[in-house]
Amino acid sequence: MRSILDKQISPARGAVAVIAVLSAGLLAACGGNDDDTGDDAETAAAGQATAADSVTVADSWVRATDKDMSAVFGILENGSDTDAVVVSAESDLATMELHEVVEEDGEMVMQEVPGGFTIPADGSRELKPGGDHLMLLGLTDPIVAGDEITVAIEFEDGSELEFTTVAKEFEGGDEDYEPGGMDDMDDSDDM
Ligand SMILES: [Cu+2]
């Protein structure tokens, strides 16, 4: 099922709360024995913040596409005095991988990032076309501009942060993060 929410939801912390409420509502609506839910992301003991408690996602977006690949971008901000490391991501829409873009034989290619995305203490890490991104692989339906999709990122400490991101068109050329997919380059400048 596609996790597209009708409402416009403000980014970052507000979205997390709203999604949590919606999820609870959906579970309740399904009724019955959801006895294996609710055991994740509750590892935070009082007074000990998890990475998910400290990280927010700003200005996120997902590239609209009618192909089977896309990517999620945005700025990961870490408000704690400890580095946070993103080790995986998931979405109902498709398989996700953490990708970086590196130069190889004179070409920019993307690959899974070794060790995940480290967000420095009291710092940020930007995911952007041509650089780090959360890859979506094996999409079965188009992503249309304006669609809202839900993504969950998991941290090294096991905590999980869910956020909603909005699809928009990107005119910068596929070569930025889809090596070999230069079939629809256009005359626009990169962002
Ligand atoms: Cu990629």
Image (tube, grey):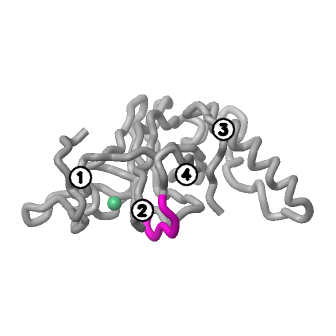
Image coordinates for residue 172, horizontal then vertical, percent: 25, 47
Task: Answer whether labels 4 and 2 touch (C-beta < 8 Å).
Answer: no
Name which of mark 1 and mark 4 comes first in the sequence: 4
Numbered mark located on residue 66 in the image:
2
* Quadrant showing the C terminus: top left
> Which amino acid type corresponds to the residue marked 1 in the rendered image?
Gly
**Which range is magenta?**
135-142
> For the residues carrying marks 1 and 4, which lies nearer the camera in this image?
1
Whether residue 97 is visible to the viewer of this picture, yes or no, is: no
**Alpha-carbon distance for marks 2 and 1?**
15 Å
Name which of mark 4 and mark 3 comes first in the sequence: 3
Name which of mark 4 and mark 2 comes first in the sequence: 2
Disc 4 secondary structure class: strand
**Alpha-carbon distance for marks 3 and 2?**
23 Å
Residue 46 vs residue 29: left or right? Answer: left
Numbered mark located on residue 151 in the image:
4
Task: Answer whether labels 3 and 1 touch (C-beta < 8 Å).
Answer: no
* Residue at the image position 87 percent from the left and 54 percent from the top: 29
Q: Looking at this view, is 160 or 70 the one in front? A: 70
Residue 183 vs residue 48: left or right? Answer: left
> Which amino acid type corresponds to the residue marked 2 in the rendered image?
Asp
Give the labeled residue for mark 1: 173
